[in-house]
Image (tube, rainbow, N blue to C red):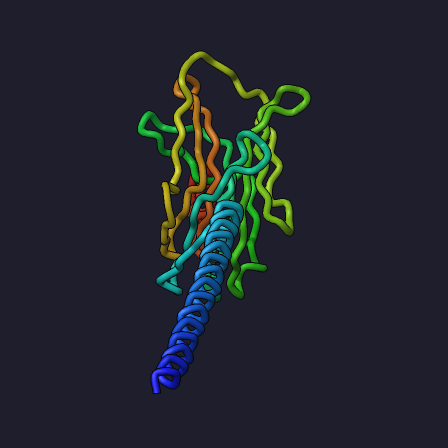
Amino acid sequence: MNLNKRFSFSILQAFLILTIVALAVSHVAMFRRLQQAREQVRQAEAEIDIVRKEYGYLRGEDPGKIHIVRIQAGERQREVRVRMRIPPGQKLMLNIADTRFSPQGEPVSWKPTQSMSMNNWSQGADVILRWTWEHDDQNVRRFRAWTDSQTLFDYRLEEWEETDFPYSVGGSLGEGEQSFSPDGTIRFTAFWNDETRRGFIFWMEPTQRWAERREAEAHNANAIAE
């Protein structure tokens, strides 16, 4: 009788031990899988962070607005890059102007020196817009703007006078994501010499506003001629 009890007790002990070992092995395996999953999540988050720095991250909560965010600078020291999401149905013009600025920092004239119709954005666009200020081989200030698919502007500021006075800089873009009405004017960048008042501005506006300004300028020119 005692032998049977010892035998049954040994079987029970063996079963409990095997159960405990199985649970321990299972927990160890689960812990390792959890560690691997956490490492994969960490790597994925790091990769997402790299992508966001490289290409920008836009929430774009209002689909009817233009959303813009500054992203990590490019290879050139003075290169500025922004990611811009434009809703469908917009007719837009990009402009640059080599013009004079008032003491209040406003262009005396918004007449573009060069303009470019962005018809390829009319169906909606998600683009990275780049621009930079450089001195070329002849030490002339040069403004360049482009996207991944096309060159937009390449303009040399001939006879730009360098002075000891500070240069003022302005524009519509700040830190973080910003939203703009597609009916408004977006000043990407502007700078001017506080002594000579000569400056430069790069902006985007609806084609209708651009056409209305040209019509008004032509009307004023005709009135002066008469």
Say whether residue 110 is visible: yes
Residue farthest top in this picture: 164
What x and y, as percent, mark residue 115? 55, 45
Instruction: From the viewer's perspective, tell me whether residue 140 is left or right of residue 101.
Output: right
Q: Residue furthest left?
A: 104
**Can you give x and y, in whole percent of width and height, for residue 148 in the image?**
62, 49
Q: Is residue 93 visible?
A: no
Quadrant of the rendered image containing residue 156: top right
Between 74 and 14, the one lying in front of the other is 14
Where residue 119 sits, quadrant-wise, is bottom right
Is residue 106 rendered to the left or right of residue 123? Answer: left
Above or below residue 183? Residue 25 is below
The answer to which of 158 and 25 lies nearer the viewer is 25
Residue 152 x, y percent position in the rendering: 60, 45
* Percent of width and height locating residue 110: 43, 39
Q: Nearer the viewer, residue 166 or 126?
A: 126
Residue 91 versus residue 83 in the image, above or below: below
Viewer-proximal residue, 131 or 37?
Answer: 37
- What residue lies at 58% left-to-right and 25% top-to-bottom? 141
Q: Residue furthest bottom?
A: 1
- Give me the residue at 52% from left, 57% from top: 126
